[in-house]
Amino acid sequence: MILKIFLESVVPVLLLLPLILIFIKDRDHVKIISPFILIFTCYQIILKIPLEYNEFDIINGKQNWTGKLLGIFFGLLTYSLLYRRLEPFNFLRFKQEPKTLLKTVLASSIMICTGFFSYFDSPRNFDIEILVFQLTMPGFDEEIMFRGILLALL
């Protein structure tokens, strides 16, 4: 099982690694790619472990709450450890520019309403857990990990 989780987490990186190595002009960039690969792989493993091993699934729900919460914790821990290194390229912002705040709220509201109402248009029964999970969890951990850490490393 752990080998399956590891391989599922490493294969995307291994598929892209030859392309990355071809396009690296400066060999010093390998120092950047190495932590990127390590962090990405660990993050993927952390997300998948509660799905495969029930002992790690703290929140027994229909969705992977435990994996997402562990992903958020791992992202915040990694972000705090690498904060100084990520500083010049820190894309994770909590404060919104006043000019773009209205546009962001409007675009987010339209997307949320579209997703919310399209949910009721499907033949599935209403499930508040799925709705709350999909509205909250994917955004938190992915923003921290991909925008806050991995994008800044690249």
Image (tube, rainbow, N blue to C red):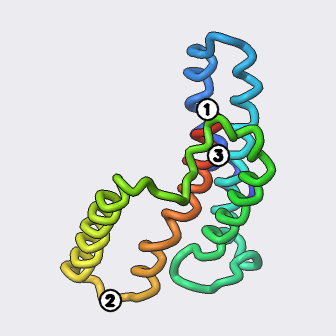
Left/right placement of residue 144 relative to residue 121 reads: right
Whether residue 48 is visible: no
Q: Which mark is residue 141?
A: none
Q: Residue furthest top?
A: 25
**Measuring 75% from the left and 38% from the top, which residue is drawn there?**
85
- Mark-to-mark CA distance, 3 and 1: 9 Å
Residue 136 at x, y percent in the picture: 48, 73
In the displayed structure image, the side of residue 119 where residue 133 appears, left or right: right
Q: Amino acid at mark 1?
A: Leu
State which quarter of the image contains the N terminus.
bottom right
**Viewer-nearest of discs 1 and 2:** 1
Q: Which residue is mark 2?
A: 126
**Residue bearing the label numbered 3:** 149
Residues 5 and 116: in front is: 116
Frontmost of labels 2 and 3 is 3
Q: Answer with the quarter of the image where residue 5 lies.
A: bottom right
Asked if the residue under mark 2 is in contact with the one under mark 1, i.e. CB atoms within 8 Å, the reply is no
Query: Mark 1 and mark 3 in contact (Cβ < 8 Å)?
Result: no
Label 1 sits on residue: 154
> Which residue is found at the position 31% from the left and 61% from the top?
102
